[in-house]
C-alpha cells in the first residue's frame, strides 16, 4: 500500500459517519482539550513576555541605564568626570544627581520618598520623566526656586496638587538649643509625573540639584552620575569602562544589576508556568490514547480485512499514527490561533471585565504596573507547537502498535 492510501484511510477514520458517531465526538473532545491547553500556554507566556517588556521599558524610562556613585556617596570632581564619560564611546548622555531619603509633610499627610536632585536639561537627556509629566514641566525646576515634582501616587498620598506646598524633612539632623532637629524646607509643588510604575509614582520626588545640595549641605559635590548608553544590553561593560577611565574609586552599577530580582523572578515564573501548563497539554495529548483505543476497537474488522489483503503491520501502525498526529496537529493549530487572538486582545478583555465587575483586576500597588500587556513571541509559539506535537505523536504509538498486533482471524470471527 502507498502512503497516500494510508493517509486517506486515517482521514476517513477521523469522522465516523456510520454505526457509531461517538468516536468522532471523542476525537473532537480530544482536539478541544488539546487546543485549550495550548491556548492557555500561549496566553500565559505572552502575558509574561509583555509584562517583562513593559516593566523594562518603564524602568529604563524612569531611571538611568547605568550609575556611577562616589565611594562615600560623594563625588566632588563631577564636572571633570562628566566630561570624561561623555567623551567615551557608547555613552549617549550623562547627568549628575544627588539622592537622599526624606519625609514629605502636608498637614496631617506624611509620606516617605526618595528625593532626587537633578539638573533639568541634563536629566531630560538621560531618562524620560520629562515626557511623562501630567502637570507642569521638568524645566520649571530652577536653582533657588525650591520647587518639587512628585509622582502621581505620592501626590495623592499627600493630598496635594500643583501650586500647593509641602515640607521636606531631611534625615540629617541640625543641632539647636532644643536638641537635634531634622533639616526642613518648604517646597512648592510645580509638577506631577506618571511613570506608570507604582514604585516610582509613590516613592520618587524631583528637586533642583542645587536646592537639594543646600538642604543636605553637600556644597559643590553630588552623589554620582547617571548615564544613558547607546546599547542597553551593553550597559554594564560601558559603565565599567567609564569607571576605569576615572581616577577615583566609584560604585558602578547598571539597570540589570539594580533590578535583577525583578527580571530573575520573571524568568523563573515563565519557566515554572511553561512546565505547569505543559501538563495541561499532556492531559490533552493523553486523551488521544483513549480516542485511538476506541477507534482501534471499532475498526478491528476493517484492520483485519486490510491485513488479509496484504497490508503489513507497519502500514496499519501508520494509519493510526497519522490519525493521532492529525488530531494533534489540528488541536495545536486551533490552540495557537485561539491563544494568539486572546493574547493580542488581553488589555481590552481585562479592561472590559473591570468595567463589568466594577473592580480593579490588576492593581499597580501589587503588580508594579496597572496594565496587563502581552507580547507574542515566535520562539514561544514554536516551542509550544513542538512540545504539543511531540506529546501527541508519542500518544499514538501504543494504540497503533496494538492495532498492528491484532490477529486478523480472531477479529473476523466476531464480525
Image: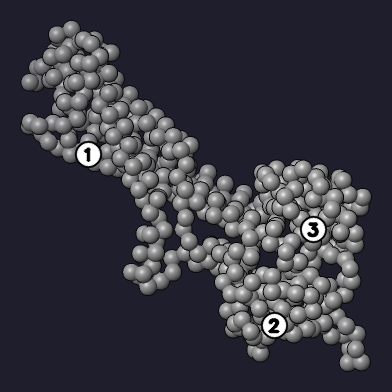
Q: CA distance from mark 3 to mark 1?
A: 62 Å
Earlier-in-chain disc, 3 versus 1: 1
Q: Residue at x 38, y 45 (%)?
A: 340
Within the image, what quadrant is residue 136 found in? bottom right
Indicate the quadrant containing the N terminus: top left, top right, bottom left or bottom right. Answer: top left
Relative depth, front residue between 71 and 394 = 71
- Secondary-structure class at tag 1: helix
Q: Which residue is mark 1?
A: 28
Q: Which residue is mark 3?
A: 225
Q: Residue at x 50, y 51 (%)?
A: 50
Relative depth, front residue between 26 and 44 = 44
Earlier-in-chain disc, 2 versus 3: 2
Please give the label number shown on residue 188: 2
Q: Position of residue 316 (x, y in %)?
A: 23, 16
Describe residue 405's horizontal placement relative to residue 248 as left or right: left
The answer to whether residue 121 is above or below residue 273 is below
- Secondary-structure class at tag 2: strand
The answer to whether residue 15 is above or below residue 372 is above
The answer to whether residue 70 is above or below residue 30 is below
Please give the label number shown on residue 325: none
Q: How would you rate the neighbour count of disc 2 (Cα within 10 Å): few for under 14, some for 14-19, many for 20 or more?
A: some
Earlier-in-chain disc, 2 versus 1: 1
Q: Position of residue 389 (x, y in %)?
A: 37, 31
One can see residue 199 in this view: no
Within the image, what quadrant is residue 155 found in? bottom right
Relative depth, front residue between 1 and 56 = 56
Q: CA distance from mark 2 to mark 3?
A: 26 Å
One can see residue 409 in this view: yes
Q: Residue at x 28, y 34 (%)?
A: 330
Q: Position of residue 95 (x, y in %)?
A: 76, 59
Amino acid at each position: 500500500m502507498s502512503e497516500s492510501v494510508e493517509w486517506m484511510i486515517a482521514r476517513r477514520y477521523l469522522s465516523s459517519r456510520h454505526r457509531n458517531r461517538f468516536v468522532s465526538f471523542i476525537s473532537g473532545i480530544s482536539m478541544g482539550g488539546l487546543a485549550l491547553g495550548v491556548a492557555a500556554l500561549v496566553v500565559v507566556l505572552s502575558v509574561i513576555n509583555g509584562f517583562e517588556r513593559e516593566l523594562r521599558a518603564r524602568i529604563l524610562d524612569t531611571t538611568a541605564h547605568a550609575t556611577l556613585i562616589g565611594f562615600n556617596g560623594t563625588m566632588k570632581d563631577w564636572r571633570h568626570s562628566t566630561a570624561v564619560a561623555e567623551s567615551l564611546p557608547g555613552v549617549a548622555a550623562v547627568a549628575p544627581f544627588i539622592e537622599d531619603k526624606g519625609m514629605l509633610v502636608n498637614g496631617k499627610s506624611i509620606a516617605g520618598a526618595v528625593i532626587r536632585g537633578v539638573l533639568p536639561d541634563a536629566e531630560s537627556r538621560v531618562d524620560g520623566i520629562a515626557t511623562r509629566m501630567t502637570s507642569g514641566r521638568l524645566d520649571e525646576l530652577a536653582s533657588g526656586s525650591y520647587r518639587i515634582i512628585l509622582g502621581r501616587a505620592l501626590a495623592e498620598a499627600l493630598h496635594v496638587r500643583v501650586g500647593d506646598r509641602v515640607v521636606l524633612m531631611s534625615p540629617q539632623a541640625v543641632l539647636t538649643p532644643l536638641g537635634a532637629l531634622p533639616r526642613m524646607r518648604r517646597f512648592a509643588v510645580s509638577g506631577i509625573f506618571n511613570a506608570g510604575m507604582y514604585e516610582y509614582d509613590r516613592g520618587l520626588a524631583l528637586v533642583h540639584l542645587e536646592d537639594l545640595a543646600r538642604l543636605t549641605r553637600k556644597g559643590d559635590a553630588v552623589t554620582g552620575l547617571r548615564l544613558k548608553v547607546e546599547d542597553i544590553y551593553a550597559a554594564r561593560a560601558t559603565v565599567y569602562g567609564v569607571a576605569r577611565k576615572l581616577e577615583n574609586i566609584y560604585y558602578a552599577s547598571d539597570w540589570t544589576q539594580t533590578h535583577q530580582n525583578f527580571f530573575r523572578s520573571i524568568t523563573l515564573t515563565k519557566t515554572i508556568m511553561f512546565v505547569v501548563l505543559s501538563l495541561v497539554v499532556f492531559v490533552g495529548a493523553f486523551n488521544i490514547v483513549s480516542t485511538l483505543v476506541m477507534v482501534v476497537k471499532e475498526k478491528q474488522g476493517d484492520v483485519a480485512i486490510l491485513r488479509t489483503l496484504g497490508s503489513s503491520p507497519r502500514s496499519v501502525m501508520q494509519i493510526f499514527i497519522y490519525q493521532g498526529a492529525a488530531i494533534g496537529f489540528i488541536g495545536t493549530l486551533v490552540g495557537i490561533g485561539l491563544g494568539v487572538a486572546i493574547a493580542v486582545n488581553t488589555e481590552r478583555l481585562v479592561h472590559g471585565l473591570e468595567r463589568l465587575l466594577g473592580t480593579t483586576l490588576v492593581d499597580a500597588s501589587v503588580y508594579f504596573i496597572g496594565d496587563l500587556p502581552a507580547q507574542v513571541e515566535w520562539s514561544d509559539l514554536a516551542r509550544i507547537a513542538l512540545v504539543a506535537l511531540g506529546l501527541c505523536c508519542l500518544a499514538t504509538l501504543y494504540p497503533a502498535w496494538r492495532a498492528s498486533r491484532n490477529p486478523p482471524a480472531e477479529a473476523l470471527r466476531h464480525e
